[in-house]
Image (cartoon, rainbow, N blue to C red):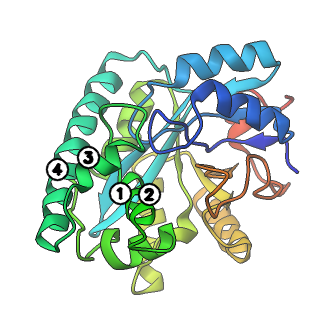
Amino acid sequence: MGTLDLHMHSTASDGSLAPDALVRFARECGVRTMALTDHDTVAGVDLAQRTAQLEGLTFVTGIEISTIYAGKNIHVVGLGINPHDEELLAVTTTMCSERDRRAVLMAERFAELGIEGMFEEAMTFSARESNLSRLHFAKALMKRGIVKNQQEAFDKYLGEGKLAYVAAPWGSVADAVELIHKARGIAVLAHPGRYSFSADWQLDALVEGFAECGGDGIEVVSGSQSPSFTEKALQFARFYGLAISTGSDFHSEAGTRPVPGAQGELPSGLPTVMKMLGLESV
């Protein structure tokens, strides 16, 4: 079990554990340095940071920002950000509102398919009154017995181009990198091995564009991508001069991703995001 995990989610977005409970669970799993990277919000960061101090963990402030690239949802993690940065708060508040608007439209799509009341059902899985995500809808579908698991929910209803999918008006990868830098953080391309492009060159172009717009790092080890992708991610890091990062992308004990710290060890030999954060010796 690894001691470093720089990508996790709480109930502030679509995770199943409250920020303080997530910190305690991460510690139980052996993690000693962690980041909370909720989707498009820093609402849980202060509580998680206070709890980490009490639990003796090194805590890295974070966020995972949604973007659109070539019609795909691409995520950029911000590490070491100032969670009280005014522009960051303004942008993420707008993004949460857009996510809620999309949720209403998705519920309407479900109603057209004869599946009524999905907005209300999805809300029962959210700890907040905003930032409703596709994962909350997936849980609602599972509760009703319409699908067996989250993957089936995305494959049939919620994935890009599927029956109830509604595209969100997210900004570009470059917009996310700029926002993270303004908040004094470092920008990390999340789980590059997870993106399903029709051709290999499209992933290459994504990483190249990310580096060209000032991106700082790349997740070479992730609970959201196959371990077999690690070498390809390391090649990207070497070629584009990106620092390497690691994260479980943990959401829930009932999910398919590893528990905190269990995503695999970060390979040696390349600059790390921990070094960029001034925490390499931790």
Q: Which residue is labeled 1 in the image?
A: 137
**What is the number of the mark on residue 50?**
none
Instruction: Please name which of the two marks, 3 or 1, marks the residue nearer to the observer.
Output: 3
Q: Which residue is labeled 2 in the image?
A: 139
The amino acid on which the numbered mark 4 sits, given as a three-letter code, is: Val
Badge 1: how crowded within 10 Å, few (<14), some, or many (20+)? many
Q: Which residue is labeled 3 in the image?
A: 120
The amino acid on which the numbered mark 1 sits, given as a three-letter code, is: Phe
How many tags in the picture? 4
Q: Nearer the viewer, residue 246 or 12?
A: 12
Give the left or right position of residue 269, taking residue 154 as reference: right
Q: Are marks 3 and 1 in contact (CB under 8 Å)?
A: no
Q: Are marks 4 and 3 in contact (CB under 8 Å)?
A: no
**Where in the figure is residue 124, as x and y percent of width and height?**
38, 42
**Where in the figure is residue 4, as x and y percent of width and height?**
78, 41
Badge 2: how crowded within 10 Å, few (<14), some, or many (20+)? many
In this view of the protein, can residue 277 be seen by the observer? no
Q: Are marks 1 and 2 in contact (CB under 8 Å)?
A: yes
Q: Which residue is labeled 4 in the image?
A: 104
**Where in the figure is residue 234, as x and y percent of width and height?**
70, 65
Instruction: Please name which of the two marks, 4 or 3, marks the residue nearer to the observer.
Output: 3
Query: Which of pointers 3 and 1 lies earlier in the amino acid sequence?
Result: 3
Q: Nearer the viewer, residue 174 or 110?
A: 110
Disc 4 and disc 1: Cα gap in Å?
A: 11 Å
Quadrant position of residue 161: bottom left
